[in-house]
Image (cartoon, rainbow, N blue to C red):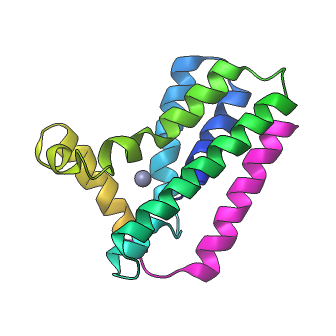
């Protein structure tokens, strides 16, 4: 799923729970749950051969940059939030993609145990849902963004 979805859900978890280890655990779990849902992102598109790698990485950078801006603005707008929990939630929610989807070290984690087990699981949960499910995936992703922002701003 998009980085903006992962980071906002992780940030929302951090905004509701002050216990950092619990935030980390839930944020990592949320990553797999979100990836299991129907969605579109640069990674699923490229598997179908729709996008060239340079376009995929450009879109991924925009995605991450947009997430950073939104979370930064929310932290300024809501100074009462536990910043540490929100930031840790956002980062750990994205951690799985940072560890397993960056091409520089992806070949290494794919082959090296125990990373290879998580790498395979992360790939497998995407596979049955990697078809173009725009009609379900895009509204679902927008709803996840809206609920996360609502939780962060309430
Ligand atoms: Zn992922």
Residue 101 position, x and y percent, is 33, 52
Q: Main secondary structure of the magenta part?
A: helix
Residue 70 at x, y percent in the picture: 72, 44
Within the magenta stretch, is there residue 152? Answer: yes
Dividing the picture into quadrants, the one containing residue 127 is bottom left
Residue under the point 71% across and 64% down: 142
Residue range in magenta is 128-154
Q: Is residue 150 left or right of residue 131?
A: right
Which residue is nearer to you in this view: 57 or 135?
Answer: 57
Q: Residue at x 83, y 22 (%)?
A: 79
Residue 17 sits in quarter: top right
Q: Is residue 140 left or right of residue 30?
A: right
As drawn, 120 above or below 112: below
Q: Which quadrant does the C terminus fall into?
A: top right
Residue sitting at x 32%, y 49%? 102
Q: Is residue 73 above or below residue 134?
A: above
Q: Is residue 139 above or below residue 110?
A: below
Tell me what residue is drawn at x 73 percent, y 29 percent. Answer: 16
């Amino acid at each position: 799923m998009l980085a903006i979805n992962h980071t906002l859900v992780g940030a929302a978890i951090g905004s509701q729970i002050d216990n950092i280890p619990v935030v980390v655990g839930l944020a990592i779990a949320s990553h797999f749950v979100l990836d299991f849902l129907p969605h579109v992102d640069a990674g699923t598109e490229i598997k179908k051969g729709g996008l060239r790698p340079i376009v995929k990485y450009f879109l991924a950078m925009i995605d991450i940059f947009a997430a950073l801006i939104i979370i930064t603005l929310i932290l300024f707008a809501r100074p009462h939030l536990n910043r540490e929990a929100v930031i840790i939630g956002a980062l750990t929610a994205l951690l799985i993609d940072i560890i397993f989807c960056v091409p520089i070290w992806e070949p290494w984690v794919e082959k090296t145990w125990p990373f290879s087990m998580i790498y395979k699981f992360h790939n497998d949960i995407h596979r049955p849902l990697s078809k173009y499910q725009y009609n379900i995936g895009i509204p679902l992703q927008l709803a996840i963004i809206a609920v996360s922002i609502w939780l962060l701003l309430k």
